[in-house]
Amino acid sequence: MAEATDPPRETFRLSQLLYDARYRSMTIQVVAAILIMLLLVELVDNTVTNLAALGKDIRFGFLWSTAGYDINQQLIPFTSQDTHARAAVVGILNTLLVAFLGCLLATLIGVLAGVLRLSKNWIVARIMTFYVEAMRNTPLLIWILIVFAVMTEATPQPREFREGGGASMILWDSVAISNRGVYIPRPIWEAGSGVVVAVFVLSIIGIFVLRNIARKRQQATGQQLPVLRISLLLFFVPTLLAYFLLGRPVTLEMPELGGFNFSGGIQIRNSFIALWLALSLYTSAFIAEIVRSGILAISKGQTEAAFALGIQPNRTMQLIILPQALRVIIPPLISQYLNLTKNSSLAIAVGYMDVRSTLGGITINQTGRELEGMLLLGIFYLITSLIISALMNLYNSSVKLKER
């Protein structure tokens, strides 16, 4: 009786890396990666050698030397005697501030414009179409300069706020809009103010918890809670109760006209306002098209079915159309947030001191460390972009359709 024997195992040969289809693609990728790495190493070595020959070896010790210049808008204290590293941090915070506020405002305007572009009202739809096309087809730098010119040329001078000068403050004489900036009240934090802030933060958390509970209840039973009214109560009532029960621990320092300018309060410079508004309006036009395409991607049968059930148009958009459209909207929306953050480097055109102006501008000019400064600047934008992408991808994974 013949015995069954296993077929002989094929031994690996180096020639298989080229002639065997199972290994050829991997071999080509490994070789290409090695060649690219060798090219990068050669470029870096050549750059370092040439800089050393010029007496400019790569060092980052300049970050700890005295900056010697002032920054006109600061989120943290800074003087000309601080280091270049602290100046870079101030610039980074200014960049993140305008990027965060720009993304918020651009999203709000973009969603509104995108929905209104689909309005059955011909005038409203045409106005939104003109807005989108005008913003998208004009360079961002021009819009920044236009808004800055309006803020500096079309607003009154501080001396015009004197009695009989023709200009007046708004919001119960608490806000002044002038060609030197917008002046708003400054909060004065006294004993007990931390409790008020804590209550306010807990109220915000409570609103999110309420919305989550209401959503789960609606999905389970179909019953809807009055989320808007309860959210407004949670937003105002607990904080106001804590504010008055603790004896008003937070007061406001109002801006007042003294001499040739306003004193007191907080000055928001026109350069910041111009950059923020221009970035928001410009990016909102692209977001509007993204929102419009996302809504149009949803079958009209969804809307018709909702209307047949007696659901109001605004509730249909809120509960049926937009939740489904988000899976189409979010991926390109990430790119717009990244573009807005990187486009903030145009701040130098209006004198807003972001990281491009501090680390990538004045610091480089004073220290002569062009390569190091630009390298650090590129790393900052890279890390910021990766963080934004990661956060938005997490949100995208939470709203995408989940299969059983």
Image: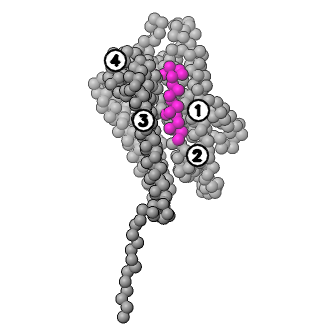
Residue 335 is marked as none
Q: Which residue is mark 1?
A: 282
Q: Which residue is mark 4?
A: 66
* Precedes in sequence: disc 3 or disc 4: 3
Which quadrant holds residue 48?
A: top left
- Left or right, 134 with respect to 190, comes to right
Identify the residue at horizontal 51%, vertical 14% (top origin).
180
Dominant SS of magenta comes to helix
Asked if marks 3 and 2 touch (Cβ < 8 Å), the reply is: no
User: Looking at the image, which residue sits at the far left?
Assistant: 191
Mark 2 vs mark 4, CA separation in Å:
57 Å
Q: Which residue is mark 3?
A: 44
Identify the residue at horizontal 35%, vertical 23% (top origin).
62
- Disc 3 marks which amino acid? Val
Query: Circle 2 sits in a helix, a strand or a loop, which is it?
Result: helix
Q: Which residue is mark 2?
A: 314
From the image, state whether disc 2 or disc 4 is nearer to you.
4
Q: Nearer the viewer, residue 24 or 394?
A: 24
* Precedes in sequence: disc 2 or disc 4: 4
Q: Is residue 251 visible?
A: no
- Left or right, 142 with respect to 323, comes to right
Query: Circle 4 sits in a helix, a strand or a loop, which is it?
Result: loop
Q: Is residue 244 magenta?
A: no
- 250 shown above or below 163: below
Mark 1 vs mark 2, CA separation in Å:
26 Å
- Disc 2 marks which amino acid? Asn
- 231 shown above or below 402: above
- In the rendered image, the quadrant that contains the N terminus is bottom left
From the image, state whether disc 1 or disc 2 is nearer to you.
1
Asked if marks 1 and 3 touch (Cβ < 8 Å), the reply is: no
Q: Nearer the viewer, residue 340 or 132?
A: 340
* Precedes in sequence: disc 1 or disc 2: 1
